[in-house]
Image (tube, rainbow, N blue to C red):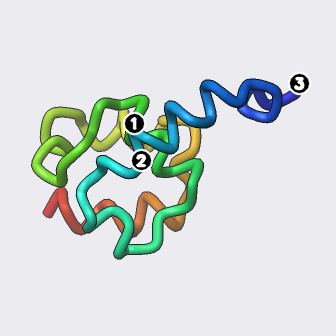
Amino acid sequence: MACELTNDSEKRHDYQAAIEQLDAVFHSIGLSQPALRALVNLQVKQVSDLHKIDFVTLQKAHGIGPKALKALAQFYL
């Protein structure tokens, strides 16, 4: 199954624009592009938005791997 972003430059551009609007904290903790896209899909823009979704939802989100989960877990404490 091919990644839809590979062939859809408009969608890539939209994701990149949304990623640029994310809280700088998400960038500073070294999240990968898939993890940043997952936050966009979850409608998380600010650290405070993480509390609107439960940790299990974050854990199951496509693009959130173990490294990203560990980095984001600090905001649930």
- Which mark is nearer the camera, 2 or 1? 2
Say which label, 1 or 3, has the lower sequence index. 3
Provide the residue designation for mark 1. 40
Of 45 and 70, which appears nearest the observer? Answer: 45
Q: Quadrant of the C terminus?
A: bottom left
Vertical side of 33 occupied by 58: above or below: above
Provide the residue designation for mark 3. 1
**Circle 1/circle 3 CB separation < 8 Å:** no
Vertical side of 30 occupied by 37: above or below: above
Q: Residue 18 placed where, x, y %?
A: 39, 39
Vertical side of 65 occupied by 40: above or below: above
Q: Which mark is residue 28?
A: none
Of 68 and 44, which appears nearest the observer? Answer: 44
Q: Residue 48 placed where, x, y %?
A: 10, 49
In whole angstroms, how far apart are the C-alphas of marks 1 and 3?
A: 22 Å
Residue 45 occupies quadrant: top left
Q: Residue 34 placed where, x, y %?
A: 58, 48
Vertical side of 74 occupied by 34: above or below: above
- Which mark is nearer the camera, 1 or 3? 1
Residue 66 occupies quadrant: bottom right
Say which label, 3 or 2, has the lower sequence index. 3
